[in-house]
């Protein structure tokens, strides 16, 4: 039974991964609850039945009191035995069955599945954002909002059904019982309900605003802490521990102030509610005594009425705190919504076909890109890289070299012109197929916090261990891999590399990245400072492997050391986003332009020395 119920909701059921979620709290919440709406309706009716049954027990209590008051001990069972037995059966069998059904639907069908379904769907949608989206925010804050958003949305749905429905049923039952005895007895309860609604109308808007502030400052705090931990090496190297503590202290202080501001409201409302509850209890008790003394109501009716009032009073504080929690969750949802409910910046065209690379020719046709600004970076770039040609990009820092490779990978959309691969506009094919056809090794190599095997196989899922090891050998990584051991005793290819690969040196990370690309074996190869973190001996060995890897492939390479790309078929010199020179190494040296000047600076022993000066000044290529 448990297993059958637990399979009623599939957290990983297919959905439209590119549909932008609504940007209003109610619509956003319902958007993610729609897949479980059937079970929420079932839960509503079960909760309604449980609430009606529970409140009816107080009426039965009054009836029992009247029986005991009007019967003698020797005649109770003879006159009311069957009725009392039925009441006992309802309490012993029906009540547990209803409560068990409620718990089954809530726990086995809705809570875990809906929470993680929402997290899964928001995560998948967030993954579809462009790289710039992630660069503009803290990774920790994004993860925090996705994790908290799932729980907050589910909590609101279940709480509204379980808690607010309960108190509504008890209030209506009490009004019905009191009205049937005397309208005067119902008056205090009616006034209390009106006062409670007024209190909620005062409490809710302020709670909503203050809860959003609490959620926002909490996420800022998490983001600040994660940022410190992620960049702990930089913190240590620059001895900035005091500054990081100060920054986190400031974030903790802001969250504390927001939290206290929210709690002031709770204390005020709780005090007012306590006064209202005391007045209701005193008024109902006084009227019950008065009406009983005049024979208008029985002892049982007075007992059931007072018991209902006591139950409502006990629930009222709980409900008020629940409402507070609901609006804290609304604040969390608002915060998550601000992050999640944004349209994707880079989307595939409808029914985008897969890129088919038959030769590997790349053409940039009058391409312009300014990162959304009015000008600069890339302007009117036209470039053709023939199938199988090996081309190097050269230029000073900020010339636009890495931007060109980012545009080729469609990490950004061009703002003018187009880029073609084998005659296919890359903006018209699916992004996954485009990037599957291009293998990339970047200067800033970060690895996943998984095993060495998993990181290398990331280039080609499903690769055999033999293929993974062969790729590692070609990247001159096998020997150091076999000597690795992580903190859990996992060795060799099973060893985990730590967050972003921090347990490995820069050269080791780069060799793993090269092995990953060798295993991927894509028809187009992009090398952006692929060997920058390697020493000369290892670099020379890997250059041999890369030379083998580049055979039959179209290659676009950027290198800091010009000597590593001098032997390529053609070199393109970029300055301020435009091509200023192109040709072979020898041709560019004879031309005596920018490339020749850069070459002389490097070959002269001072990478950044100005001509005519002896002091070095670094130039980043």
Image (cartoon, rainbow, N blue to C red):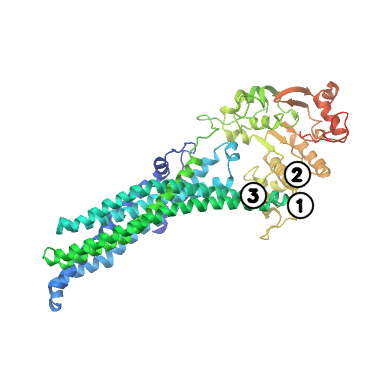
Q: Where is residue 412 in the image (x, y as percent from the top left)?
A: 60, 31
Does the residue at mark 3 contact the one at mark 2 (Cβ under 8 Å)? no
Relative to 560, say whether 286 is above or below. below
Identify the mark nearer the N-term, 3 or 2: 3
Badge 3 marks a residue whose secondary structure is helix
| Residue carrying label 3 | 230
Q: Is residue 4 visible?
A: no
Q: Which of 451 and 106 is in front in this view?
A: 106
Residue occupying image coordinates x 69% and y 25%: 577
Does the residue at mark 1 contact the one at mark 3 (Cβ under 8 Å)? no
Alpha carbon distance from label 1 to label 3: 25 Å
Q: Which of 221 and 138 is in front in this view?
A: 221
| Residue carrying label 1 | 480
Q: Is residue 89 visible?
A: yes
User: Most extreme residue toward the left, as rendered?
Assistant: 295
Residue 205 falls in image quadrant: top left
Residue occupying image coordinates x 44% and y 54%: 263
Does the residue at mark 1 contact the one at mark 2 (Cβ under 8 Å)? no
Q: Where is residue 56 in the image (x, y as percent from the top left)?
A: 23, 61
Q: Position of residue 530 (x, y in %)?
A: 74, 39
Query: Which quarter of the figure is the C terminus placed in?
Result: top right
| Residue carrying label 2 | 475
Q: Nearer the viewer, residue 325 or 369?
A: 325
Query: Viewed as shown, does residue 537 lie left or right of 10?
Result: right
Identify the mark nearer the N-term, 1 or 3: 3
Alpha carbon distance from label 3 to label 2: 28 Å
Badge 2 marks a residue whose secondary structure is loop
Give the number of marks. Answer: 3
């Amino acid at each position: 039974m448990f297993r059958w119920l637990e399979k009623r909701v599939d957290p990983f059921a297919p959905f439209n991964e590119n549909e932008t979620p609504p940007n209003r709290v109610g619509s956003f919440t319902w958007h993610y609850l729609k897949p479980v709406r059937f079970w929420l309706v079932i839960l509503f009716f079960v909760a309604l039945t449980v609430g009606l049954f529970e409140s009816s027990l107080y009426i039965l209590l009054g009836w029992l009191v009247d029986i005991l008051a009007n019967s003698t001990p020797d005649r109770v069972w003879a006159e009311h035995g069957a009725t009392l037995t039925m009441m006992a059966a309802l309490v012993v069998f029906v009540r547990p069955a209803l409560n068990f059904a409620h718990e089954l639907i809530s726990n086995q069908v809705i809570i875990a599945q809906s929470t993680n379904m929402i997290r899964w769907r928001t995560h998948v949608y967030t993954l579809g954002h462009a790289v710039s989206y992630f660069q503009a925010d803290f990774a920790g804050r994004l993860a925090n909002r996705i994790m908290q958003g799932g729980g907050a949305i589910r909590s609101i749905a279940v709480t509204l059904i379980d808690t607010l429905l309960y108190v509504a049923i008890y209030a209506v039952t009490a009004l019905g019982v009191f009205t049937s005895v005397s309208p005067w007895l119902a008056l205090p309860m009616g006034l209390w309900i009106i006062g409670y609604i007024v209190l909620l109308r005062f409490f809710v808007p302020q709670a909503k605003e203050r809860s959003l502030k609490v959620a926002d400052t909490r996420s800022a705090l998490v983001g600040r802490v994660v940022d410190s931990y992620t960049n702990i090496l930089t913190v240590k190297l620059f001895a900035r521990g005091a500054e990081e503590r100060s920054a986190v202290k400031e974030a903790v202080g802001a969250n504390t102030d927001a939290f206290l501001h929210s709690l002031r409201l709770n204390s005020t409302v709780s005090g007012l509610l306590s006064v209202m509850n005391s007045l209701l209890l005193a008024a109902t008790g006084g009227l019950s005594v008065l009406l009983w003394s005049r024979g208008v109501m029985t002892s049982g009716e007075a007992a059931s009425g007072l018991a209902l009032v006591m139950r409502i009073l006990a629930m009222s504080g709980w409900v008020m705190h629940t409402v507070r929690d609901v609006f804290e969750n609304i604040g969390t949802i608002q915060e998550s919504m601000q992050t999640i409910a944004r349209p994707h910046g880079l989307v595939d065209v409808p029914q985008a076909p897969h890129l088919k690379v038959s030769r590997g020719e790349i053409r940039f046709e009058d391409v312009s890109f300014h990162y959304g600004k009015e000008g600069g970076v890339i302007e009117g770039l036209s470039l053709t890289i023939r199938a199988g040609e090996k081309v190097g990009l050269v230029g000073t820092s900020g010339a636009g070299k890495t931007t060109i490779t980012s545009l080729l990978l469609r990490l950004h959309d061009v703002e003018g012109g187009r880029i073609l691969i084998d005659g296919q506009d890359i903006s018209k094919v699916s992004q996954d197929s485009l990037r599957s056809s291009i293998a990339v090794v970047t200067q800033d190599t970060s690895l996943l916090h998984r095993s060495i095997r998993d990181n290398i196989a990331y280039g080609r899922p499903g690769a055999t261990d033999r293929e993974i090891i062969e790729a590692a050998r070609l990247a001159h990584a096998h020997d150091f891999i076999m000597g690795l051991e992580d903190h859990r005793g996992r060795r060799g290819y099973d060893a985990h590399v730590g967050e972003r690969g921090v347990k490995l040196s820069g050269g080791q990370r780069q060799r793993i990245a090269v092995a990953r690309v060798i295993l991927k074996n894509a028809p187009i190869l992009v090398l952006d400072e692929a060997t920058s973190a390697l020493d000369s001996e290892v670099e020379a060995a890997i250059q041999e492997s890369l030379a083998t890897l580049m055979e039959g492939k179209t290659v676009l390479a950027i290198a800091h050391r010009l000597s590593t790309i001098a032997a390529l078929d053609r070199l393109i010199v970029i300055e301020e986003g435009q091509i200023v020179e192109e040709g072979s190494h020898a041709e560019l040296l004879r031309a005596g332009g920018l490339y020749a000047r850069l070459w002389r600076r490097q070959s002269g022993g001072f990478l950044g020395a100005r001509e005519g000066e002896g002091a070095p000044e670094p130039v980043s290529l």
